[in-house]
Amino acid sequence: MLETTIETLKKLGFTEYEARAYISLIGFGMATAREIHENSGVPQGRIYSVLRSLSDKNFIEIQDGNPSYYYAANPVARLSKLKTEINDLINESIEYLSNL
């Protein structure tokens, strides 16, 4: 199931490392970059840029500190919204292509 979920997230625009870090973080609830790196398999040298990218895409939140903590902001709602947006775009594309 993990690999299927990673592939699904990749189809939604996640990179492999983003998908692995996101899944790991959801499992933790809240975690440090080190914990996410150790659990997800994302290389230590890449974990901060991956987490920053997920934050920039509004999939996770960062609680600054020493160390900083990361958490997924309501993943079910966020992914449901993304699903709706993608379905709307697909429907618009189907309509456009049907009218050509």
Image (cartoon, rainbow, N blue to C red):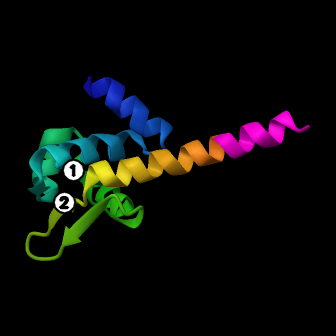
Going 13% across and 40% down the picture, which residue do you hit? 39
Q: For numbered disc 2, what is the local secondary structure?
A: strand
Image x and y of residue 17, in percent:
34, 43
* Residue drawn at x 11%, y 57% as measured from the top left: 30
Q: Position of residue 85 (x, y in %)?
A: 53, 51
Q: Which residue in the protein does label 1 denote?
A: 44
Q: Which residue is mark 2?
A: 71
Quick one: 20 or 95, which is closer to the camera? Answer: 95
> Do callouts 2 and 1 mark residues in contact (Cβ within 8 Å)?
no
Viewer-nearest residue: 36 or 78? 78
Q: Is residue 43 left or right of residue 99?
A: left
Instruction: Choose top left, top right, bottom left or bottom right for residue 61.
Output: bottom left
Inspect this view and state whether residue 49 appears. Answer: yes
Q: Is 57 placed left or right of 33 in the picture?
A: right
**Residue at horizontal 34 percent and vertical 58 percent from the top:** 59
Q: Amino acid at mark 1?
A: Gln
Q: Main secondary structure of the magenta part?
A: helix
- CA distance for labels 2 and 1: 18 Å
Q: Position of residue 20 (x, y in %)?
A: 28, 40
Q: Residue at x 29, y 48 (%)?
A: 76
Residue that extends furthest to the bottom in the rendered view of this protein:
65
**Residue numbers of the magenta segment:** 91-100
User: Mark 2: which amino acid?
Assistant: Tyr
Check the picture and name the quadrant holding the N terminus: top left
Question: Percent x, y for residue 89?
Answer: 64, 47
Task: Answer whether residue 92 is magenta in the image.
Answer: yes
Tell me the crowding category of disc 2: few under 14, some 14 to 19, or many 20 or more residues within 10 angstroms, Cα based: many
**Label 1 packing within 10 angstroms: few (<14), some (14-19), many (20+):** few
Whether residue 97 sits left or right of residue 77 in the image: it is right
Please tell me in which quadrant of the rendered image residue 100 appears: top right
